[in-house]
Image (cartoon, coloured by chain):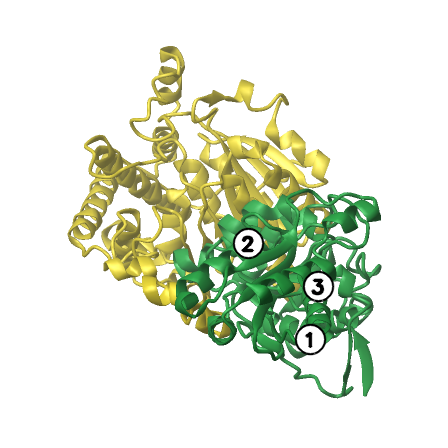
Amino acid sequence: MDPVESPRPPPSLLRRAHFFMHLTRAWDHRFESMARSGRIGRWYSAVGNEVCTVSAALAMSPGDALSTVHRDLGAVLATYLDPTRLAPALFSEGDATAWDAVRPPPAPLLHRLACQVLGKRDGFTRGVDRSFHYGLLRADWGIRHVGMISHLGAMIPVAAGLGLASLQDGAAAVAVSFTGEGATSQGDFHEALNLAGVLRLPLVLVVENNQYAFSTPVSEQYACARLSDRAVGYGIAGETVDGTDFDATYGAMRRATDRARRGEGATLVEVMLPRMRGHAIGDGSYEIIPQAERERFLAMDPVARFEATLRERGLLDDARARAVLETATALVESAVENALKAPEPDPVEARRPVFAPGEVATAFSSQHTERRHG
Amino acid sequence: MAEITYLDAIRRALLEEMSRDPNVFVMGQDVAGFGGAFRATRGLFERFGRLRVINTPLCESGAVGAALGAALAGKRPVVEMQFADFVSCAFNQIVNNVAKTYYRWEQPVPMVIRLPYGGGVGAGPFHSQCDEAWFTHVPGLAVVAPATAEDALGMLKAAIRDPNPVIFLEHRFLYRREKFTLDDDDTEHLTPLGKARVARPGELITVLSYSVTLHEALAAAEEVAKEGISVEVIDLRTLMPLDEETVFASCRKTGKVLVVHEATETSGFGAELVARVADQCFEHLDGPIRRVAYADRPAPYNKHLEAALLPERGAIVSALRALARY
């Protein structure tokens, strides 16, 4: 693709990115430990994906649609939360963005997210569905987030449809969608990108290529050199970036969102990531990665590399590094502790309606099968 | 006043609802300038333009998934499957994504998926299937199957207005055969969803049917009436959710029940009807609940072979006579 130069991200954006990477990682560490101790059933760690997910979120504008799968906590947090209110000691007044001005108070939203992941009553699905399987559509907050179903690739056409609605409305909003390299083998990947190409949809598809899908290495997943090469086949833009390099990744995300916003269509951004964890914690998929490769991946830690860059640029010192780490850890600890103490859903929640109010819902609930179960 | 066909009714419902609500749009293969394989969307592209009458590539799953995304963004998409048989390519999007969204996170999904369906036209195994039971099994989907032109208009309009996903089964055999007369300026002709209709009142036997076989059932009822067998024919109209009040009232009144549908018999929607009637009307029944349905085979191509499997009037008449004697 054309190497359009993007401006180097300003210090306030870098501070924000740094904070969200640590908040994401602190969250992962907390849930990984709960998964190992059996306190929660499964945890799909996002360790290693932080630069990718946070940079994509920071390339978005209020009202853009976000579609995530299970290692995209960084994008969720960076989209939902105003860091200047969540961690005021770490930010100055000038760090707040126009989007922050319409974002809701961050602590209650963080609490709802923790409750969601733990299946509690106050989560977004009130215990009905797991972790990131939900949506949050609050145009007034600038947040339009559609979560996943377990079929992963199935969300790409949905993201294309979010972009389609934007096109129909003549709006500048774009849809940013995440998926893994495994899901690129599914038919929905092809159908959605082809549709996006033909209809010139404002879609950014971020493929988080962490080298393995469960236990399947990329050599058994696809035979092309780079997944972004597939963009040519759809008549859309495509590029592959190093997901341990914040400037490169953020630049790619900005080029993609800017292009979509200008009406120039979709981009496939393949982000190369180190596999720093297995598929789910404790499922044996980490152990099958050869030891030397695991060590190589761990040494590629994107957050560590980002911090080194910040230090080189004089934007991070020991005191701030410690403060960010401690603040992120404390925020997560408090959110998780409160969520663990939060009420379980009422069992009646399991029988809540499958239809939105209207003729169909009324007729459905009058059936004897419903009356018996209800 | 104008006489309009079942197919005209579909087109008119789309035209009226798109005129009424700018969020309503249609998408599917060949639906734009060409007007769709059956011309159900003819004229809409010229009237509403390329952003509301959208040709898609050949991608049933991509189209339904994109319709879901648009619905989540406030639109009311109407997706046309070229033939109902091809909806299997969109199965995952419908049963796992579209159907489960409202239950999972309480976001309504106003969407209609139009399925030109059914056999009797010598179209072979991949252009003849009756798909209703694939979808009635899935919580979160409404499934409707109008038998008349009047209901095709009224139910499609109601389906577009409902905040839930509706699988809209429109029978190809009825497209040009069914007609009704409507005032030109009547743009609010609505048929409520979830309401069955007594298509023919009777006393001795209840026939539960819908879509194309309703007409066979009515003809059979007329035939056996000459023999003194009084048959009540119920047009279910909406399969899911089922209007149990109308169905059970008729079954309790007559005490004998025959279920007729074009779909294959085993695990067809008739099985659900039989189970519900047996459960709720048992003490009123004077005989077994029988079914007349398609033999458990794919649809053969040759029209003589197809006719050998279709649940036709003769089979319904025989079943009615046997039930009357029981």
Q: Chain of mark 1?
A: B
Q: Position of residue B274 (x, y in %)?
A: 50, 59
Most foreground residue, A250 or A334: A334
What's the CA distance linking mark 2 and mark 3? Answer: 18 Å
Category of crowding for the residue at label 2, using alpha-carbon neighbours closer than 10 angstroms: few (below 14), some (14–19), many (at least 20): many
Colour green maps to chain: B
Disc on res. B5: none
Q: Quadrant of the N terminus of chain A?
A: top right
Do the residues at discs 2 and 1 belong to one chain?
Answer: yes
Q: Chain of mark 3?
A: B
Q: Is residue A243 above or below residue A10?
A: above
Most foreground residue, A262 or A279: A279
Disc on res. B225: 1
Label 3, secondary structure: give it. helix
The tag earlier along the polypeptide, 2 or 3, is 2
Q: Chain of mark 2?
A: B
Q: Position of residue A111 (x, y in %)?
A: 25, 55
Label 2–label 3 contact, CB within 8 A: no
Relative side of A372 to B229, left or right: left
Residue in the image at 57% along x and 52% along y: B268
Q: Position of residue A24 (x, y in %)?
A: 32, 41
Q: Nearer the viewer, mark 1 or mark 3?
A: 1
Label 2, secondary structure: give it. helix
Do the residues at discs 1 and 3 belong to one chain?
Answer: yes
Residue pointed to by mark 2: B135
Colour yellow maps to chain: A
Disc on res. B212: 3
Visible residue check, residue A261: no
Question: Which of the 4 image quadrants contains residue B46?
Answer: bottom right
Q: Quadrant of the C terminus of chain A?
A: bottom left
Relative side of A55 to B128, left or right: left
